[in-house]
Amino acid sequence: MSTVQKLLDLDLRKILNPKIWLLVVLISHTLLATLIPLFKSEFDSIEFQAASYGLLISVVLASIYFMTDGKEQARLTALIAGATFLWIIISLISNPSNNFDLTAKMEPPFLYKFSFDIELAPPILFWAVLSLSGFVYWNVEEENLEQSGE
């Protein structure tokens, strides 16, 4: 069976395993949103404070990854990632420098259009998928979670 066929045969539950997505978001968040800004910014800057708070989020994600399993891990993942995802969206909407714009045409065919800075797309997608993975596994028993990770 080819690799492409194996990828096409995966179901949504195997793709959205919270343990895998925790690791993906933990590594990318720690490297790109925490360590690089910490080394590049001045100690008294706002960027340094934001990156140090990002380090705290990395510790929380690592704690969820290493100290929990099964339902508890899925539920903590859904709550923490969901809250972070909502925080990113609210920050995006409320900060005028992000160029967020939402328009709607109130006559048929009811066209909706929104725009924002594209550099915010990767964190939005990563945190949304991480949150979704937690919600997909919200009530899954530990045996099923371990089988889907294989």
Image (cartoon, helix red, strand yellow):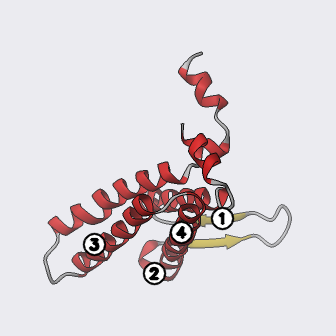
Q: Which mark is residue 51?
A: 3
Q: Marks 2 and 4, Cα distance to the nearest angstrom?
A: 28 Å
First-in-chain label (3 vs 2): 3
**Could you tell me how far apart the alpha carbons at marks 3 and 2 are, in whole angstroms?**
18 Å
Q: Which mark is residue 95?
A: 2
State the residue position of label 4.
Answer: 76
User: Can you say whether 61 is above or below 141 in the image?
Assistant: below
- Front label number (3 vs 2): 3
User: Circles 3 and 2: CB distance less than 8 Å?
Assistant: no
Left or right: 27, with 142 as reference point: left
Q: Are the residues tagged 4 and 1 within 8 Å (C-beta)? A: no
> Label 1, label 2: how many angstroms apart (C-alpha)?
18 Å
Q: Earlier in the sequence, mark 1 or mark 2?
A: 2
Numbered label attached to residue 113:
1
Query: Residue 53, how many percent across, how many down?
Result: 31, 77
Callout 3, which amino acid? Ala
Q: Are marks 1 and 2 in contact (CB under 8 Å)?
A: no
Q: Residue furthest top?
A: 1
Which mark lies nearer to you, 3 or 1? Answer: 3
- Judged by depth in the image, the label closer to the viewer, 1 or 2, is 2
Q: Position of residue 3 (x, y in %)?
A: 54, 22
Residue closer to the observer: 54 or 143: 143
Mark 2: which amino acid?
A: Asn
Give the mark nearest the N terminus, 4 or 1: 4
For the residues labelled 4 and 1, the Cα–Cα distance comes to 33 Å
Q: Amino acid at mark 4?
A: Leu
- Please state the horizontal and vertical placement of residue 144, each as a whole percent of the image: 64, 46
Q: Residues within 10 Å of mark 4 (few under 14, many from 20)?
A: many
